[in-house]
């Protein structure tokens, strides 16, 4: 019995530090985090599959809050229930809280320094590259049918040219996929 408690405690510590480590490098938000989430949660820990991570990521986009934090909550909940969701979420956000507190204390005296401005510019470029990489990986994994390609092109066009709300795009894409797939399965059946 004692061994089970120790094992459960160590598992929670592992959960916390896995998300704490990812939280330390969480520049750029959800899309930039996707490669890091994949490496840590799929390749290193085998806590989820690519398809499940993409599902968590999609759900994280339509729920309030930061995508990567939502994903950490989902993974933590899946591993250890409510306590796991809290532990993973806290592990993920704690580095940001520490860093923001330190930066806020000193930023006003360093914000105009060229070194700080150049460092921030470099970070923005790196985040842009991570986002492009995540989009390309996501496209390779999800654009596997003519329907998904059509939905992607339509959503892209509506977003870029008509500034359509992302919420509408997600709902419309989901409904289109559901209705087209449902209609296709009825024709076969």
Image (spheres, rainbow, N blue to C red):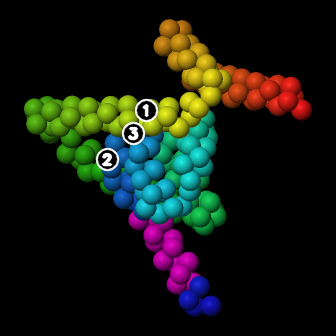
Q: Quick check: marks 2 and 1 in contact, CB under 8 Å?
A: no
Q: Which circle's residue, 2 or 1, is located before the other in the chain?
A: 2
Nearest to the observer: residue 144 or residue 12: 144
| Pair 1/3: label in front | 1
Does 126 sit left or right of 132 as displayed?
Answer: left
Q: How crowded is mark 1: few (under 14 residues within 10 Å), some or many (20 or more)?
A: few
Nearest to the observer: residue 61 or residue 98: 61
Q: Which residue is drawn at 50% across and 31% down?
A: 139
Residue at mark 1: 136
Quadrant of the drawing holding the N terminus: bottom right
Does 81 sit left or right of 157 as displayed?
Answer: right
* Distance of label 3 from label 2 (alpha carbons): 19 Å
Q: Which circle's residue, 3 or 2, is located before the other in the chain?
A: 3
- Residue 65 visible somewhere in the drawing: no
Residue 8 shown in magenta: yes
Instruction: Classify 90 as above or below 171.
Output: below
Residue 174 shown in magenta: no
Give x and y (percent) for residue 37. Answer: 45, 50
- Outermost residue, right direction? 189
Q: Is mark 2 on a helix, strand or loop?
A: helix
Q: What stretch is highlighted in magenta?
A: 5-17
* Distance of label 1 from label 3 (alpha carbons): 12 Å
Nearest to the observer: residue 97 or residue 71: 71
Q: Residues within 10 Å of mark 2 (few under 14, many from 20)?
A: few
In the rendering, which numbered label is found on residue 100? 2
Residue at mark 3: 32
Instruction: Classify 117 as above or below 16.
Output: above
In the rendering, which numbered label is found on residue 52? none
Q: Residue at x 45, y 50 (%)?
A: 38
Give x and y (percent) for residue 93. Answer: 43, 53
Give x and y (percent) for residue 3. Answer: 56, 89
Which quadrant would residue 48 be assigned to in this image?
bottom right
């Amino acid at each position: 019995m004692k061994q089970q408690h120790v094992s459960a405690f160590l598992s929670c510590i592992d959960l916390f530090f896995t998300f704490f480590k990812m939280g330390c490098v969480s520049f750029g938000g959800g899309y930039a985090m996707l490669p890091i989430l994949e490496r840590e949660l799929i390749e290193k820990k085998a806590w989820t599959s690519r398809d499940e991570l993409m599902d968590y990521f999609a759900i994280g986009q339509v729920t309030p809050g930061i995508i990567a934090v939502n994903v950490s909550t989902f993974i933590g909940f899946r591993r250890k229930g409510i306590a796991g969701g809290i532990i993973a979420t806290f592990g993920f956000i704690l580095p940001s809280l520490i860093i923001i507190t330190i930066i806020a204390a000193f930023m006003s005296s360093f914000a105009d320094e060229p070194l700080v401005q150049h460092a921030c510019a470099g970070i923005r470029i790196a985040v842009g590259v991570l986002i492009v990489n995540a989009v390309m990986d996501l496209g390779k994994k999800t654009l596997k049918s003519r329907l998904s390609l059509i939905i992607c092109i339509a959503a892209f066009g509506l977003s870029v040219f008509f500034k359509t709300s992302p919420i509408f795009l997600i709902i419309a894409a989901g409904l289109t996929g559901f209705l087209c797939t449902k209609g296709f399965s009825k024709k076969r059946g």
